[in-house]
Image (cartoon, grey):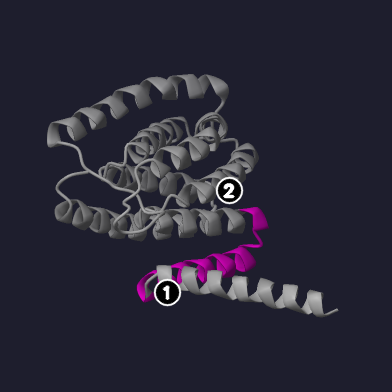
Amino acid sequence: MIDNQKENKAFFYTLKTQFKKINNFFSLYEKIWLLFFIFAGIVVTIVTKNNALFLIVLIAGLTMELTLAKRSKWCFLFVFINSAGLIIIGFITSLYSEVLINTLFWIPYSVTGFILWNKHLDKEEDKHLTQVSGLKTWQTVTIILSIVIVSLLWSRVLVLLGDSQPILDAFSTFFQLTTGILILLRLKEQWLFWIGYILVSATIWILLNQWIMLVISFGYFSNSVYGLIHWSKYIKNHKKI
């Protein structure tokens, strides 16, 4: 009996310690931001009588975005959860390119990303925060032009597959792919392409009347601006990566 009491105390002490670490890791702004959009998602879910799966995707996606902005390797855990939910949503809404990219790219990507980021941690700062850098202007412009060309070509294939939004779905796919690769490389420009993806996906969700996903888009957009500023400050203060 005494041993059980000691084990229970040890368990709750550990739980309390971990909660304090998580609480201290996020700033007041970040906690308010996260809780606000989760609350907004819950309200929209209730009002629209939407599938609870969308709410799970929202929470996982927002947490992923916030931990990514903070350069935490644990963002990839939420990438996995978010992608699993989006695969199901893709089938429900007939967005087949969304299904393919999440199945073939984002799911294995979440594991690869965690491993790669873990190899480039900033040991002077925190044991789970990674180092980041940036691209040159001409490199960014080249990537943008490549996305436009490839997306237009892929949209023709999606038309044949019966995709509900071929052009938008194609641009969404290649913005995601580009962002994902830049995240693996720890490059700040990923936020610019992430914003591009957000604008395209928000348009898709409006056309499909999926308003809870629009809440996610607003959350993503505000956090992307925050993440870009956060990463830019880090790069400015760290000349060598």
Q: Nearer the viewer, residue 162 or 149?
A: 149
Taking the image as shown, residue 171 lies to the left or right of residue 231, namely right
Task: Indicate whether residue 167 is drawn in magenta.
Answer: no
Decide: is 229 above or below 241.
below
Decide: is 126 above or below 147.
below
Tell me the amino acid under the disc marked 1.
Ile
Rendering coords of residue 172 (x, y %): 41, 37
Please tell me whether the stretch drawn in magenta is mainly helix, strand or loop: helix
Rendering coords of residue 153 (x, y %): 38, 20
x 16%, y 56%: residue: 237
Residue with the mark numbered 1: 32
- Classify mark 1: residues with Cα within 10 Å, few (<14), some (14-19) or many (20+): few
Quadrant holding the C terminus: top left
Quadrant holding the N terminus: bottom right
- Classify mark 2: residues with Cα within 10 Å, few (<14), some (14-19) or many (20+): some
> Mark 2: which secondary structure?
helix
> Mark 1: which secondary structure?
helix
Q: Nearer the viewer, residue 140 or 96?
A: 140
Q: Is residue 51 visible?
A: no
Q: Nearer the viewer, residue 204 or 125?
A: 125
Where does the magenta region start and end? 28-53
Residue with the mark numbered 2: 81
Rendering coords of residue 39 (x, y %): 53, 71
Q: Nearer the viewer, residue 19 or 104?
A: 19
User: Label 1 vs label 2: CA separation?
Assistant: 22 Å
The answer to which of marks 1 and 2 sits earlier in the sequence is: 1
Taking the image as shown, residue 174 lies to the left or right of residue 77, namely left
Task: Indicate whether residue 39 is drawn in magenta.
Answer: yes
x 25%, y 30%: residue: 143
Q: Is residue 48 visible?
A: yes
